[in-house]
Amino acid sequence: MNLTKNQLRIELRQWRQFVALAEELHFGRAALRLHMTQPPLTQAIAGLEAALGVTLFERTRRSVQITAAGAALLPEVRELLARASGLPELARAAAAGELGRLRLAFVSTVGFELLPRWVRAFRERWPLVALELIEATGDVQLELLARREVDAGVLLHSPGLAAAGLAHARIASEPLVVALPETHALASHERPPLAAVLAEPLVIFPRRILPSLHDAIFGLYQAAGRAPQVAQEAIQMQTIVNLVSAGLGIAWVPQSVRQFQRTGVAYRSVHLPRGRAVPACETSLVWRADAVSPALAHFIEFARAQ
C-alpha cells in the first residue's frame, strides 16, 4: 500500500495511545489510563492502523491481542516517546550552552601545551558540548570565520594587532626566541648577539599567514640596517623548526615553541643592544560578535578566566 506523507503524519499522542493499549491489551483499561473514554481510543487506534496500512491489534468481543507488526513497533515507539520526553530538557540545556557544538580553529603553536590543557579543562566543565578542533593558519581561520564555518579561532599576531572586525580576547603574550641548528656556533652562546643572528639565513612563514608578526621580524632587520636573507618559507611552526634542524637557517619563533623538542635544534634568547627589544607576539581568541552561541559564550568566559 503506497501512503502519502500526509497519511503518515502520526502524532505522539497516537503513539502513546498505541503503547497504552499494547501494555493493557484492553480498550477500557487503556482509555482509563489515558484519561479518555473508550470510543475515541478505538477510533484513534483504527486511524493509526489505517495510516500505517497494517493491523496492530487483533480484536474479538472478549480479547485484544497485539500482532507481530505491533510487537515489532512497540520497543521502537517506547524509545521514540522516551526521547521525545527528553526534548524540553535538551532544549533548555542547549539554550544555556550546556549542550551543543563548538568549532574552534587554532594555530599550531597553541597545540604544544595551551590547547591540550584547555580542552581537558573545558570538557570537564561542559562535558555535553562537542568541541571540534581545526588546525589552521591565521589567514585560513579568517576565511573560515567569514564563511561561518568555525565559531572561533586562536590566532598569533603582534601585540595589539588582533584581526580587525572581530571581537577578541588576549590569551597570552610572549617574546620571540631564535631557533638555531644545535651544531651552529651561535648555539654555544647562552644569549647570542643580535648582529650575528641577523647575518644568518632566515627560515620564516609567508607574510600572508601572519602579516603583523612577519612585519615585526622584518622591522628588526631593517632597524639594524640589514635585509633578511630568506632561505626558505614554510607555513607550520613545526615545519620551520624541522628546516632549522636540517641546517637551512635560523628562525624567529614564539617562546612557547620551545615545547617542541626537535632533535638538532637549540632555542636561545637573543642579546640586544641597549634600547632595542625583541619583537613579542600575542595569542588571541577571536570570534564574530554577531554569531555568539551559548556554547561559544561559555568558551569565551572560560578563556578569559584562564
Image: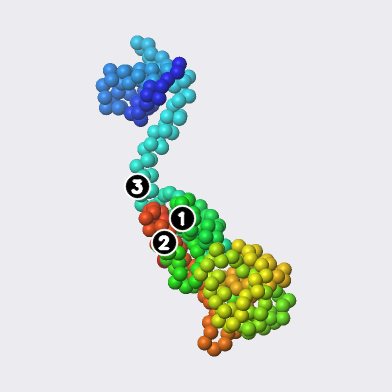
Give me the disc on residue 145. Answer: 1
From the image, tell me which residue sits under label 3.
92
Spatial CA distance of label 1 from label 3 is 27 Å
Q: Is residue 176 above or below residue 17?
A: below
Q: Are marks 2 and 1 in contact (CB under 8 Å)?
A: yes
Give me the disc on residue 76. Answer: none
Spatial CA distance of label 2 from label 1 is 9 Å
Query: Which is more foreground, mark 1 or mark 3?
Result: 1
Outermost residue toward the top in this view: 61
Return the residue nearer the eye: 91 or 61: 91
For badge 2, the amino acid type reads Leu
Residue sitting at 28 percent across and 17 percent down? 39
Dot 3 or dot 2: first in sequence order is 3
- The percent position of residue 224, horizontal first and vertical second, equals 58, 83
For badge 1, the amino acid type reads Leu
Q: Is residue 212 left or right of residue 268?
A: left
Asked whether the viewer can see residue 21, the reply is yes
Q: Is residue 41 above or below residue 133?
A: above
For badge 3, the amino acid type reads Arg
Return the residue nearer the eye: 214 or 282: 214
- The percent position of residue 108, horizontal first and vertical second, equals 57, 62
Q: Are marks 1 and 3 in contact (CB under 8 Å)?
A: no
Dot 1 or dot 3: first in sequence order is 3
